Image (tube, rainbow, N blue to C red):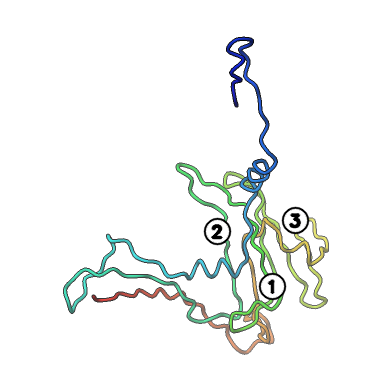
Amino acid sequence: MFICLCSLFKRTEDEYIPDAESVRQVKEQHLQPQTCSLAQCFQLYTKEEQLAPDDAWRCPHCKQLQQGSIKLSLWTLPDILILHLKRFRQDQDRRVKMQNMVKFPLTGMDMDYLYDLYAVCNHHGTMQGGHYTAHCKNSIDGQWYCFDDSDVHPISEEEVCKQTAYILFYQRRATIPSWSANSSVGGTHTYLLSEIHFNCR
């Protein structure tokens, strides 16, 4: 908002000058939710972090406080891998829904073992009120279906990966689910290992 200098002599109303096209585009991009991949989420989740000075560790050998780092790692991988996407963050005194689009693979997610997606739980709405739907894959014919209360209808693979995805369900290839009547081998467990490293100086 600018006030024209000549208005001091002729008129008093403000003169509106519209934003340049480049400024408008930057504003629109800033307002749009960011897109990331599931692989990027894993990288950030397992990224090594430096501990704060308040969390310094006293070395039993040199008896000095040492700066440390912490890193989360997946120790073993299960037959069924369930990934819960963080969709809510604390913003002062309220919780805000994060609308970021997380792109996730439907087949062949490589984590040493290959994983294929077989279901997605979707959350619509806010923290105060919302609605859940599910996308599930028929293991016999490979068709995806949308479950919305009593309504069930087929959907395409392109409709599975949505901004509303909240919980992802993957199955390791060449495994039989532990709940299957034909399964004679129990599933493995997942352990999240927290590694803390300290360097004596």
- Mark earlier in primary sequence (3, 1): 1
- Apparent side of residue 152 relative to residue 80 in the rendered image (left or right): right
Comparing 26 with 120, the one in front is 26
For mark 1, give the secondary structure: strand
Reading the image, the residue beneath label 3 is 148
Q: Identify residue for label 2.
A: 86
Quick one: 55 or 94, which is closer to the camera? Answer: 55
Q: Nearer the viewer, mark 3 or mark 1?
A: 1
Among the two numbered marks 1 and 2 on one chain, the one whose residue lies closer to the N terminus: 2
Residue 52 point in image, percent of width and height: 32, 61
Front-most of 135 and 45?
45
Density class for disc 2 (Cα within 10 Å; few <14, some 14-19, many ≥20) is few
Q: Residue at x 29, y 63 (%)?
A: 55
Cα–Cα gap, marks 3 and 1: 19 Å
Q: Which residue type carries mark 3?
A: Asp
Residue drawn at point x = 51 percent, y = 77 percent: 190
Residue with the mark numbered 1: 117
* Type of amino acid under label 1: Leu
Q: Is residue 120 above or below residue 109?
A: above
Q: Any mark on residue 68, and which?
A: none
Residue 166, compared with residue 180, is above or below; it is above
Q: Residues within 10 Å of mark 3 (few under 14, many from 20)?
A: some
Question: Looking at the image, do the residues carrying marks 3 and 2 touch, with CB atoms under 8 Å apart?
Answer: no
Circle nearer the N terminus (3, 2): 2
Side (left or right) of 142 relative to 127: right
Q: Secondary structure at mark 2?
A: loop
Relative image position of residue 176 (x, y in whole percent) = 67, 84
Q: Amino acid at mark 2?
A: Lys
The residue at 80%/60% (across/down) is: 152
Image quarter (top left, top right, bottom left or bottom right) of the C terminus: bottom left
SS at mark 3 in the image: strand
